[in-house]
Image (spheres, helix red, strand yellow):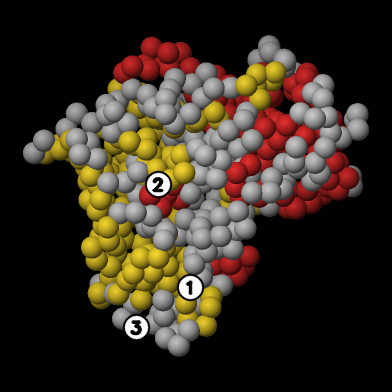
Amino acid sequence: MTPARRQTAPGTAVLSRKAVAAAVPVALAAVLAATTPASAGTVGAAGAGDPYFPLQGNGGYDVRHYDLRLGYDTSTGRLTARAVLSALATRRLGRFDLDLSGLKVTGVSVDHAKASFRRRGQELVVTPRHALHAGRRFQVTVDYQGKPGPVTDPDGSTDGWIPTDDGAFVANEPQGAMTWFPANSHPLDKALYDITITVPEGRTAVSGGVLVSRRTRGGHTTFHWRQSAPTAAYLVTATIGRFKVERYTTPDGLEVYNAVDPREAAAAAPVLRKLPSVLAWESARFGPYPFRAAGAVVDRAPQVGYALETQTRPLYDRAPDLATLVHESAHQWFGDSVTLTRWQDIWLNEGFATYAEWLYSEQHGGRTAQQAFDALYARPAGDDLWAYPPANPGSGARLFDTPVYARGAMALQRLRVTVGDATFLRVLRTWAQDHRHGHGTTDQFIRLSERLSGKKLDRLFHTWIGTAGKPAKP
């Protein structure tokens, strides 16, 4: 994620604000299986155990596929929807939760049998007619409606379903998915998606992945999008507006779909023309592009204040500059394909995408990554840059502040200097390949860096991402 308004320092853009597996991995299964005993079988936990967002995600099951069918009236702001979740019980379940904030639920069924439900804050608590045995595949259908709106994050920003003057800007990081569909919304539980959106004729509805179909009938247009790679809920969108659409296929077969608000088209065009070359440059450094589709959604939504790396099709609240395009595109490897297991590790997303900006600048006639590092290091010890360690921001309120982005990138530059360019790029490529469409942790990245370099790197990482305060001059 990148902010729309950047705070610049000499040598770098400093960021102050946010951006199917066949079996459940062992670590993931342990989290999803967390339960509390109950008389009617077991109860899936109301959260996935993330200390920054305790109620985000749920225990006891793993969602494999979402089928979301949405109808949105742009004149009234009203949403009518059905969500069908195909899931696997990771232990016996007599009751389980889904994340859903606001909106009126009109019916719930489990495997086509009516289920009882109740609301408890952001939790939709579902009790199936019969307990679900561990290892059972099941479907949950939720019918719901209402006027969706955004959620306020701990840092005071908004995400989720954000109404605009011609539709909605739908950006979910870190907790906005629950504002428009019931989900197991922690990044641990990635799934596949089919999203069908019906809007008034003249509006366009955009999601990630590939456009399967588009049809207009009776004054409404229905768009069916399919995301065929595992996707975290925070990386899904259903953005709606009046858009100028551009579609093409790159020479290597990548399907590109750009949707641009006509009011931003002139400013966005020269940057979006560089998207194929940016993806090619990143692929040469980070490994093959992880998905079969790409593109951008450029809206006019100044109230949002940031861009987001929606999987395969990043969202921009205005025409992006080239650095922002590079940043959000890099997230397709770092954050989207390789996804964090807990929000504390957000530097694995933002530090890496920021470093991609530095590397791109260096290799395209701009300032080098070391010059960007030096400009930041010149900041005094009392600067916010040194306020907390990037690998432990401390709370959800700090996820998208300067240390995560800038000092996270500085750690990568120190790694590069220590192990050499060839090994450094090998680390990045191996990280993206080994964790493709999965998850990664800070400790796993450190161990990989040590294995490929043959060096002990605990002290380097402890200094640059594990402690507060300005490090001694390297």
| Amino acid type of the residue tagged 3 in the rendering | His
Residue behind mark 1? 44
| Comes first in the chain, label 2 or label 1 | 1
Considering every residue shown, the one lying at the far left of the view is: 218
When asked about the image quadrant of residue 412, the answer is: top right
Asked if the residue under mark 2 is in contact with the one under mark 3, i.e. CB atoms within 8 Å, the reply is no
Q: CA distance from mark 3 to mark 2?
A: 32 Å
149 relative to 405 in the view: left or right: left
316 relative to 355 in the view: left or right: left
Q: Kindly report which numbered mark, 3 or 2, lies closer to the viewer in this rendering.
A: 3
Q: How many marks?
A: 3
Which residue sits at x=69%, y=24%? 359
Q: Where is 449 relative to 166, above or below?
A: below
The quarter of the picture where the C terminus appears is top right
Residue behind mark 3? 130
| Comes first in the chain, label 1 or label 3 | 1
Residue 68 circle label: none
Q: Where is 368 relative to 257, above or below?
A: above
176 relative to 16 in the view: left or right: left
Q: CA distance from mark 2 to mark 1?
A: 27 Å
Q: CA distance from mark 1 to mark 3?
A: 14 Å
| Amino acid type of the residue tagged 1 in the rendering | Gly
Residue behind mark 2? 227
Mark 3, residues whose alpha carbon is within 10 Å: few (<14), some, or many (≥20)? some
| Comes first in the chain, label 3 or label 2 | 3
Q: Position of residue 17 (x, y in %)?
A: 58, 33
Q: Helix, strand, or loop for circle 1?
A: strand
